[in-house]
Image (cartoon, rainbow, N blue to C red):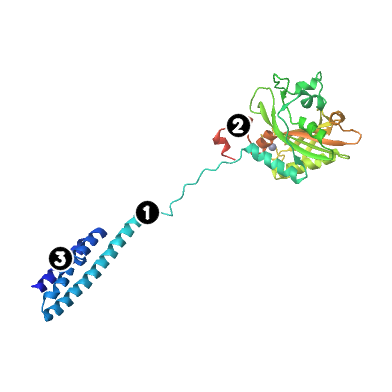
């Protein structure tokens, strides 16, 4: 009777273990058979009432069943744990071969890139980079630069005047005077900065744009020094051999004054649309600093001399990248800006 009972218990337990789907069910099966009130425990508890021979036999079989069930339960537990692990892995699986989403990086505006390049080149030649105010007095913007009130040369610049009597600087040249006033020569500076002109805008004119002023002041500075410095600058800026030529010109703050032409960096002098089929590009104004400007800055022109130059940062950028409309720089159009 008891033997049959053990066999059916074993069969039933085996079936239940096989069918169980999770650890909770397995735990219930364990309790049902091997717990304190479990079926196997009950059988083992009832052994005392049996005859010795029967008791030995039953005890052996019941313990074997107990060991068997423990092994079965353990095996099933491992099986379920493995299944759980596998399904979790599948759910969390990541395809590391799928291309990632790259964050969009910003970049510097083409004019800023040009400004940085210019600063780098002049710094390598020992020039300092100087800044100055965008709102100026008439004195620094005109008078100190040898352009008195009744001088016709004031008409060369279309000026934004402010109600306070101040004005928006029409060139970066006022910084020359401001700087010389506070420092003792020898001086080597460049002044990149924003300037303003009261004029109609078109493909080559804007009401505000950027200029780079340059100045070298010492006891013996000549036009030859200027030519060497500026030629070196253009070679480094356009990263190719560049020739320059000086044409006589007029500026109130330099004497003599020159207009500088650049051998076309696009066609190397072979004539193209950028140089208007001439092989040369007009690029900057320059000259030897006028004695009156030195006097107005507090220096004795008998002791000091130097050259000064000014060029359009926008224009340089336009030539370098073959851009035909200055207004593109200020349009904020990403289709344009993303090309740099
Ligand atoms: Zn050309």
Whole-percent x, y for residue 284 in the image = 75, 33
Q: Using the image as rendered, state which of residue 329 and residue 161 is in the foreground.
A: 161
Q: Which residue is mark 3?
A: 12
Q: Does 305 sit left or right of 46 as displayed?
A: right
Distance from Cα at disc 3 to Cα at disc 2 = 85 Å
Residue occupied by mark 2: 328
Which element carries disc 2, helix, strand or loop?
A: helix
Confirm whether residue 84 shows in the render.
Answer: yes
User: Which quadrant of the view contains residue 340?
Assistant: top right
Q: Is residue 93 above or below residue 117?
A: below
* Residue designated by label 1: 92
Query: Where is residue 268 drawn, in percent x and y?
Result: 71, 41
Nearer to me, 117 or 224? 117
**Can you see residue 266?**
no
Between label 3 and label 1, give the one nearer the viewer. 3
Out of 220 and 138, give the one closest to the viewer: 138
Q: Is residue 14 above or below residue 257?
A: below
- Closer to the chain start, of discs 3 and 2, is 3
**Label 1 element class:** helix
Give the x, y percent position of residue 210. Answer: 69, 32
Q: Is ligand 1 less than 8 Å from the beta carbon at label 1?
A: no
């Amino acid at each position: 009777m008891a033997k049959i009972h053990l066999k059916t218990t074993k069969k039933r337990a085996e079936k239940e273990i096989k069918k169980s789907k999770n650890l909770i069910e397995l735990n219930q099966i364990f309790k049902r058979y091997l717990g304190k009130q479990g079926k196997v425990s009950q059988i083992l508890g009832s052994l005392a009432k049996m005859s010795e021979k029967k008791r030995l036999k039953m005890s052996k079989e019941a313990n074997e069943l107990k060991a068997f069930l423990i092994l079965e339960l353990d095996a099933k537990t491992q099986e379920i744990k493995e299944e759980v692990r596998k399904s979790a892995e599948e759910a969390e699986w990541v395809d590391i071969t799928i291309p990632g989403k790259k964050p969009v990086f910003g970049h510097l505006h083409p004019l800023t890139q040009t400004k940085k390049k210019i600063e780098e080149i002049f710094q390598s030649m020992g020039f300092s980079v100087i800044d100055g105010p965008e709102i100026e007095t008439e004195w620094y913007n005109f008078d100190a630069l040898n352009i008195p009130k009744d001088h016709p040369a004031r008409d060369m610049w279309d000026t934004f005047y402010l109600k306070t009597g101040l004005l928006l600087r029409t060139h970066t040249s006022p910084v020359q005077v401001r700087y010389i006033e506070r420092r003792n020569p020898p001086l080597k500076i460049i002044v990149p900065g924003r300037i303003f002109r009261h004029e109609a805008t078109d493909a080559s004119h804007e009401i505000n744009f950027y200029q780079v002023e340059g100045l070298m002041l010492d006891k013996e500075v000549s036009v030859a020094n200027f030519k060497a410095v500026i030629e070196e600058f253009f070679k480094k800026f356009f990263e190719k051999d560049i020739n320059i030529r000086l044409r006589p010109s007029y500026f109130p703050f330099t004497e003599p004054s020159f207009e500088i032409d650049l051998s076309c960096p696009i066609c190397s002098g072979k004539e193209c649309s950028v140089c208007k089929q001439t092989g040369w590009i007009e690029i900057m104004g320059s000259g030897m600093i006028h004695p009156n400007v030195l006097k107005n800055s507090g220096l004795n022109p008998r002791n000091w001399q130097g050259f000064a130059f000014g060029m359009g940062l926008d224009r340089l950028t336009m030539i370098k990248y073959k851009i035909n409309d200055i207004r593109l720089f200020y349009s904020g159009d990403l289709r344009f800006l993303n090309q740099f």
